Amino acid sequence: MPRFLDGWLSDVVKNSLNRARVNKPRERPIYLLSKFIKSSVNKNAIIAEYKKKSPSGLNENRNLVEYVKFMEESGAIGISVLTEEKYFGGSYNDLETVTKIVKLPVLMKDFIVTEKQIDTAFNLGADVILLIVKILTERELVNLYEYAKSLGLEAIVEITDENDLKIALRHNFNIIGVNARNLISLEVDIQKVKKLLELIPKNIIKIAESGIKSREEIIELKKAGADAFLIGTTLMKDPNKIKELI
Ligand SMILES: O=C(O)c1ccccc1NCC(=O)[C@H](O)[C@H](O)COP(=O)(O)O
């Protein structure tokens, strides 16, 4: 069983535990996010996220195919697709649509607590999964990471505070995501992200997640050590903003 959680997160995790596996043969090679981030030398490595709604108040029902193609053409190095249904309005269909049309790493953005969910990510063509330290026990985190790796998928291990970081650094995880958003209060704190980024060793790929609105913030986060940037709300509200952020 995952960690004991309060409020909406406990509901999300309960729903995730009950989600059925989608069984379909994978039709796509694996695009390694780590490779795309490392080879992004002359531009900011942006992972553009598609999410229709969010607990923090987003509500944008954009055309998925147009959005994703535009992000690929504009130079995003990856696409993130929300698949959580109740709080983010996502779906496995959205993920499948995206993996059929882009030649970029695709992140299945969800609250992963079971191997079934990772099988589904693999079968639907995703290349990367997200493992959130806050919602898993340490043993579950390691087991799910190893399981994803055994399928050839990469995992972003997401931390939100120093305690999460302590846990993450006890293992050989190669990609750490630092989320500016507190998962309970939903407050965004970019300064906190900068502090945490500075504590992560150089050899680990670091992704700054959430709340990014401007090029200035990206430059600050880069100075603190971020290698890539996961951006949802800002791009869903105004897709053209990618041209300024990249
Ligand atoms: O997006 C939310 O409101 C949210 C609330 C609570 C937990 C997670 C949440 N979002 C998941 C994410 O990590 C973000 O979608 C992602 O980092 C992009 O963030 P943003 O650019 O702020 O949309």
Image: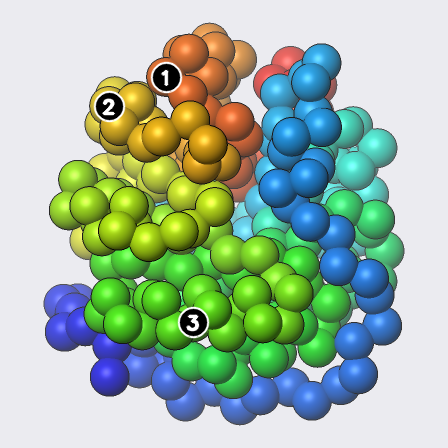
The residue that disc 3 covers is: 144
- Badge 3 residue CB within 8 Å of ligand 1: no
Q: Which badge, 2 or 3, is on the more N-terminal residue?
A: 3
Q: Quadrant of the C terminus?
A: top right
Q: Is residue 233 visible?
A: no
- Give the residue at x 43% y 71%: 144
- Give the residue at x 32% y 31%: 200
Give residue 224's mark. Answer: 1
- Left or right: where does residue 164 sit relative to residue 141? left
- Left or right: where does residue 218 sit relative to residue 160? right
Q: Are marks 1 and 2 in contact (CB under 8 Å)?
A: yes
Task: Measuring from the top left, give residue 168's x and y in whole percent.
Answer: 29, 50
- Left or right: where does residue 244 sit relative to residue 185? right
194 or 57, nearer to the observer? 194
Secondary structure beneath dot 1 equals loop
State how the image is colored.
rainbow
Task: Measuring from the top left, give residue 39's x and y in whole percent.
Answer: 71, 28
Give residue 195's mark. Answer: 2
Secondary structure beneath dot 2 equals helix
The three-letter amino acid code for the residue at tag 1 is: Ala
- Give the residue at x 36% y 30%: 201
- Left or right: where does residue 170 sit relative to residue 36? left
Q: Quadrant of the N terminus?
A: bottom left
